[in-house]
Amino acid sequence: MKKRMRSWKICPCHYSEKVEGEMEWYQRSENEINSLNSQLQITRQKNSSFLAIVGQARAEVKLHEERLQERDRLMKELKSIYGYDIQSSEGVYEAHSLKIKSLEAEWKSIKQKNEHGISQISSKIENIRAQKSFLMQERQQNKKRMAVFENNINSLKKRLSEFEGNFEDISALEVSIADAETALSSYRSEYVKSDWESKLTAMKQELRELNESYQNTVELVHKAASQANDRAKLSMLRSRKLKLMEQKQSLFDELIAEYTEITREKVTSETIDLASSLKTLSANVDKLTLEEQRVSKESTELNLKLTLAYERNESIAEQLEEFDAQLKSSTGNPDQLSSEIEEIEAQIEEQRKDLHSLQFGVLFYERAIKVSDEKHACQLCRRGLDDSERKEFTKYCNSMVLTIPSKAQDLEKELTQLETTLNQLRSLLPIQERYIALSSDLEKAKKEIAELEDDFSSVSKKHKEKQASLELEKEKLQKLTALSSKMSNVDRMRDEALTTGESIRELETTLSNTGTAETIESLQEKLKDLETQTSQKREEYRVFENAFEDAKKQLVSLESKKSEDSMMLRETKLRLREKQNIQMNLNDNKSNLEEGEIAVQNINKKLSSNDEEMQELDKQLNSLKNEAQDELNCFSEKLRIAREQYTKLQSLMVAIKNDTSADALKTAEENCEQTSSQIKNFEEKIQEKTNERAEFEKKLHNLKDNERNIADNLRYRRLKQQLSQSMSRLQQLKKELQNVDRENFMLNSQNLKEKYGQLNAKRAGFLGECRQLEGQIAHNTRELQIDYKDAKERYRRQLIKTKTLDKANEDLGKYGRALDNAIMQFHSLKMNEVNRIIDEAWKQTYCGTDIDTILIRSDNETKGNRSYNYRVCMVKGDAELDMRGRCSAGQKVLACIIIRLALAECFGINCGILALDEPTTNLDDENICSLAQSLARIVEFRRRQRNFQLIVITHDERFIRLMNTESYCDYYYRVTRDENQNSIILRELIRDHNF
């Protein structure tokens, strides 16, 4: 330092550089001291931690001794309680474990015994309750039946009072019928004797002969009148025949040329067969159409599958992106989720151990304070403490007791955060599993799409080839169809030529004969006589026919009188039979009512006895439950104490076995001694460096004072030099100012002031305009905020909506076309199924031979194939005709019922109700029988269907009998009207009525 000061005196020009060098040395010294201080602080922290470990190890040694004492005490207690004659702790532990198992087995045995007794009484109570419930239901049903019987009795009495008629009326009707039969038989014998029909036939024959004679005479008259024109007519017919033959040959040559061009076959007038070619070509077109439809259907199905595969692929990709985003937002890498969970679980376990150590530290320091207060000694080293050391030691322990809870709270917060993070990551495990499964599904979907695209490409190519072939064949068919019209013209001309030739031959034959011998006048006279005879004969025939009709009417009148009397007799007998049935039903209902009252009384007696028995069993059950519960509670308490003793002994033995506190104490004391020596060395070095720094600071302070004095002197010299320069410059400027024209300066100054005023005025105007424009801008901005607030954001949203709607419309159009195709295919399948069922039902039901089967035809009504025009057709052989306007009323009714049955079977899978209202209307006896048998077969076939119901509304009791209803149901509902025209619905047994 002295050498440096001397060098500063010798070299003042390098004074600042020297000062900077010394400052660098001072800074290095300061850094060394800071480094030593930090090392000292770290060593002290290590020493403190080692001291804490020493204290903890000493506490664990103490705790180990206490555990040994506690184990010995617990073993003595167990030996005294349970009488174990074993010295080793492991033997006592095993013996006590066996004792607990025996106690548990005994507890289970007691519990099972009590539960068995309780279950026996409970089963008896449940049986009594079930019997009581059954008796109450039976009583309720008897009461309901009694109410029904009472209603039936009242109704039957009312119906019985309404019946009229007796056996005397039947006798009178039988006498009337006998008289009518006598009169009818006598009149019928007279009718047969009159032989009306043979006489009427003879008169018809005479009238027919007169008409034939009249026609022959008329023909003779025409022949005689027409022979004059026959030769002229013959010439015209010959020329017409020649012209027709020429036209036919020309048209036929054109037809053969076009046919050869279409079919590539050489034909002549003898070998051409246009109908066969048309039939063959039409069959080819139909075959190609079916193949094209099949390929089109296959292409549509593949397109639909491909669309669904694309959608499924997109859905899986979206789900994968969503799951990947969820996993990445939580983990960063979905593949490392399991490793992160394991890492966090390890951190949680470590935090829990640290928290347990802190909790033990509080107990340790509190116990240390207690030991120092009571024994005036350290808990760890057992060294005695005077009052000052004890206060310092107590203060230190209290500070540690106060700081440990905050550390424990921080650890608990960190532990809670780690557990929350762990739960969040565990909640992502299902998402990870789903992510892996979806990745596999995505690969499968891509493979499926590739296969479907290849299949669709090949099928589309095949479809185009089929369409091209079909169009070519259709074009040929159209040309051949056009040729068929020309062929029809050729045939028509040939037929006309043949007809004309026959006319020519007839005329030639007529002209070659001589004709008739009579004159036209004689023929006309003969014609008048025949007209008179014919009119007379017709009048006689009319009179005789009227008499014949009167005789038939009289016969029909007598037969009607007999039929009416017979019908009245049947109705009277039916009413009497029904009256007898009502009387029998009335007696049956009365007897059933009396039986129901007796049954209700018996049930009431049984219910009262059941109530008494159940009360007694309830008392027994409650008593048994209380006794069993007391016994189990006593034994459970004994078992709980034994388990607690077993658990405590187990924990003590495990802790004693795993104790390593003695080794830890030795290691911690060695570490404490080592760190104490290091602290002493660091403190000596720091003290030495601090003394050097203090000495240098004094010298450096003197150097700074010298530096400040030198800087002030230098600044003074520089300012003095600047002042002299400024004074000389001022003198020079004053001399120059005296030589300048002052008036010019004043004039320029005035001009500049005026110009400044003008510019300032313009500036003020511009500022006013700017403020006005700013106000307009603010006003317009406010209006825009009102009308067009968030215009850009709204435009963006609307653009998103528009694009989304466009995409949605495209998707909907695609799905709509797919749905239309699916609906058309579904409609075709269902129509085939309906027609198949109709065909089977018609052939099984209809007894006639004029119609083989019926079916429903559906014609497309619009171009989009979305609506159909349905019509019912009847088939006989290969012929097919519409049933509308061509079938009888009975056939219509039968067809309607069969179609309803078919539609119900096809579309009514979940609704098995079929209602028929008067199904026998307009049906004859054979078709009624067939319909009843068909319905019986349908019921037999569908009775296994759980929700199937057949409702038949009819007046035809014979139809009900033919349906064999007794095999399927027990009751039917009869609907009648009373005197007030109110409907009455009665449920009656089928077996009680002979349909």
Image (spheres, helix red, strand yellow):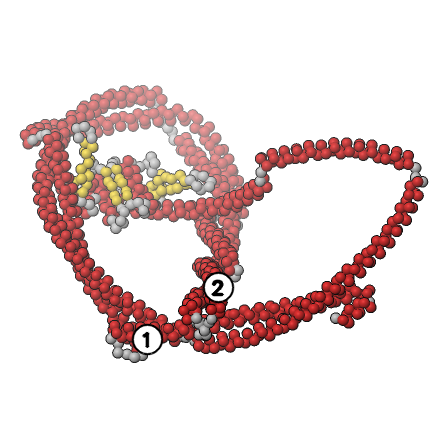
Residue identified by numbered label 2: 399
- Please tell me how crowded label 1 is: few (under 14), some (14-19), or many (20+) other residues with Cα within 10 Å: some
How many tags in the picture?
2
Q: Position of residue 207 (x, y in %)?
A: 25, 26
Instruction: From this view, report whether residue 781 is shown above or below residue 42.
Output: above
Residue identified by numbered label 1: 72
Q: Which amino acid type is shown beneath numbered disc 2?
A: Ser
Instruction: From this view, report whether residue 920 is shown above or below residue 611.
Output: above
Is 303 or 357 nearer to us in this picture? 357
Task: Please give the name of the residue rendered at 90% of the width and 44% of the height, measured from the top-left corner.
Answer: 733
Q: Which of the 4 image quarters holds residue 911?
A: top left
Is 971 or 917 nearer to us in this picture? 971
Is 743 or 322 nearer to us in this picture? 743
- Position of the N terminus by quadrant: bottom right
Q: Position of residue 53 (x, y in %)?
A: 48, 71
Residue sitting farthest toward the front: 387
Q: Earlier in the sequence, mark 2 or mark 1?
A: 1
Looking at the rendered structure, the secondary structure element under dot 1 is helix
Residue 196 appearing in the image: no
**Residue 752, disc:** none
